[in-house]
Amino acid sequence: MSKAYEEHKKLAPKSVNVSIITVSSSRYEKASQGIFVEDESGLKAVEMIKASGHKIVSRKLINDDEEMIKLEVLRSLYDEDADAVILTGGTGLAKRDLTYESIKPLLDKEIVGFGELFRAISYQKIGSSAYLSRALAGTLNGKLIFCLPGSPNAVELALSLILPELSHMIYLVRM
């Protein structure tokens, strides 16, 4: 590893404030009717983020609605002081999957390598359907946003890529 990388890692925050947002029309509808909704992907994200020493500042379940997605991401970043927002769900090809369309226009910079690497590793695990994923990552005003597919396995894979570099990325986007 380069000296610059080692120096960045030393200067990076030890803990990052993270907001988790699960995007799901079907789960949101049930939850809004008072029906208990299991969120395995959200639970997996909480478990992995806490185990890596970061702090969960909020966790939400929202509808797959473009305005709601934007509002909740911005609320997480600015009202709840999250350094990073992790969205799970809504990244597929169905008409109702709007996470990608909601978030991409907000980004200052896209972290293209994240989606590329996620799909490459997914391909090794699940085959050609991996390229249907629209996993996305980027920056917004010195903060990070990640859009992950909604399956627990996809969340686990994505976080195994994100978490080792999360503090480093926060340091870089704030330079």
Image (spheres, rainbow, N blue to C red):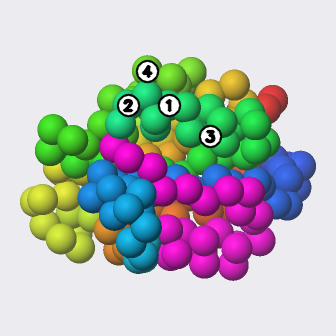
Give the image location of residue 141, x and y in percent.
69, 25
Mark 2 to mark 3 CA distance (whole Å) = 19 Å
Q: SS at mark 4? A: helix
Quarter of the N terminus within the rendering: bottom right
What residue is drawn where x is 79% and y is 32%? 174
As rendered, which of 161 and 105 lies closer to the eye? 105
Q: Amino acid at mark 2?
A: Glu
The reply to whether callout 3 and callout 4 are in contact (CB within 8 Å) is no
Residue 123 as seen in the image, left or right of residue 144: left
The reply to whether callout 2 and callout 1 are in contact (CB within 8 Å) is yes
What residue is drawn where x is 83% and y is 50%? 12
Residue 106 as seen in the image, left or right of residue 126: right
Q: Amino acid at mark 1?
A: Lys
Q: Which residue is mark 3?
A: 144
Q: Which residue is mark 2?
A: 66
Q: Which residue is mark 4?
A: 105
Q: Earlier in the sequence, mark 2 or mark 3?
A: 2
Q: Quadrant of residue 59?
A: bottom right
Q: Amino acid at mark 3?
A: Leu
Give the image location of residue 99, x and y in percent.
36, 39
Give the image location of residue 75, x and y in percent.
66, 36
Q: Quadrant of residue 164?
A: bottom right
Q: Which residues are magenta?
A: 42-64
Crowdedness of circle 4 by 10 Å Cα count: few (<14), some, many (20+)? few
